[in-house]
Amino acid sequence: MYKKQDNICISTKMLACLRKLYPIGTRVELVKMDDVQAPPVGTKGTVYGVDDIGSLLVHWDNGSTLHVLYGIDVCKILK
């Protein structure tokens, strides 16, 4: 699970872990996003990267491209 952390400052080590855990092409499902324009919970998408602050860059199936923010939003990997 990619979920809220107590400390939203991300270390280089954690950033490397996120990039390994969410490689390009990983399918995810939105669990929670704190944004008024967020895709509906349950929306699926494809990861196209992890930026330098740990946000997941996702092309959501509904056309949205809002990022999953590290320490704030929640998504899960689809198997």
Image (cartoon, grey):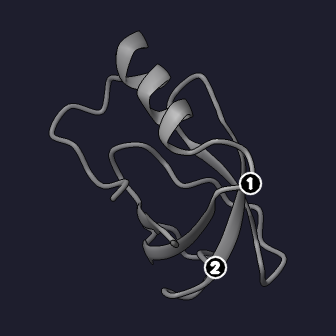
Q: CA distance from mark 2 to mark 1?
A: 12 Å
Name the residue: 41% across, 59% down.
73
- Furthest toward the right, the residue is 63
The amino acid type found where label 2 is placed reads Lys
- The first of marks 2 and 1 along the sequence is 1
Measuring from the top left, give residue 27's x and y in whole percent: 63, 66
**Label drawn at residue 25:** 1
Contact between labelled residues 1 and 2, with CB atoms less than 8 Å apart? no
The amino acid type found where label 1 is placed reads Gly
- Furthest toward the left, the residue is 6
Q: Quadrant of the N terminus?
A: bottom left
Name the residue: 74% across, 54% down.
25
Q: Is the residue 61 above or below the residue 15 in the image?
A: below
Name the residue: 36% across, 23% down.
14
**Label drawn at residue 44:** 2
Q: Nearer the viewer, residue 24 or 56?
A: 24
Q: Is residue 20 left or right of residue 9?
A: right
Measuring from the top left, give residue 21's x and y in whole percent: 48, 41
Name the residue: 46% across, 69% down.
33
- Furthest toward the top, the residue is 12
Measuring from the top left, give residue 47's x and y in whole percent: 69, 54
Measuring from the top left, give residue 52's x and y in whole percent: 59, 22
The mark closer to the camera, 2 or 1, is: 1
